[in-house]
Image (cartoon, helix red, strand yellow):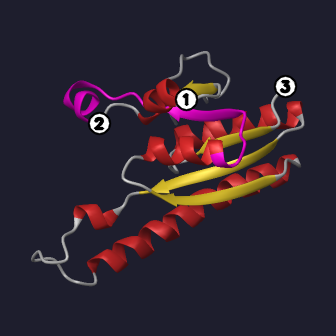
Amino acid sequence: MFTHILMPTDGTDHSARSITRGIELAKLCGAKVTGIHVMPDYRLAISDEGSFDPGLHGKMDAEARTRAESFLASVSNAAAAAGVPCETVMATNSQPFDAIINTANERGCDLIVMTSRYRKGLAALLMGSEASRVLHRASIPVLIFRALMSADHPDKTSPKPKV
């Protein structure tokens, strides 16, 4: 069915759950996976001629790379534990959905598995959803796991009893 699954991660618990499910699907299909984390392009946000510390861009980039390595290591470790072949990609783009779609096309992926976060109010209006943007622009299927789960969802842990 699927042979190469792209799995974007932002390091959140929601993203980790979608990666777990994506790896389960990859194992069932005999597919390989590629984990991707898209780092912000800080050069667009910081002017070299502004009043900012000239080394700020380098510091922010280094921190973003460290986080990305950690997020992608969790994808690699989960795939290795399941016996699923895995590659990882670190991308930089001010529009994460563009990097996700471009990577899927460049690497010949035939499915994108990702999570969708629920935002309310002004945040939803201003930020929108990367998952929605990927869903509407990708030329391949996109499987989206919702961040909100019902109480009887298998991934939802039961509350611990109060002592």
Q: Nearer the viewer, mark 3 or mark 1?
A: 3
Mark in the foreground, 2 or 3: 3
The percent coordinates of residue 116 (x first, y second) are 48, 30
Give the amino acid at mark 3: Met
Image coordinates of residue 70 in percent, x first then y, are 58, 63
Report which residue position mark 3 lands on. 1
Circle 3 SS class? loop
User: Which dot marks residue 127?
Assistant: 2
Q: Quadrant of residue 45?
A: bottom left
Q: Residue at x 85, y 47 (%)?
A: 84
Dot 2 or dot 3, earlier in sequence: 3
**Alpha carbon of mark 2 to alpha carbon of mark 3: how far?**
34 Å
- Residue annotated with mark 1: 159
Q: Assess whether mark 1 and mark 3 are in contact (beta carbons under 8 angstroms).
A: no
SS category of the residue bearing label 1: loop
Q: Is residue 14 left or right of residue 6?
A: left
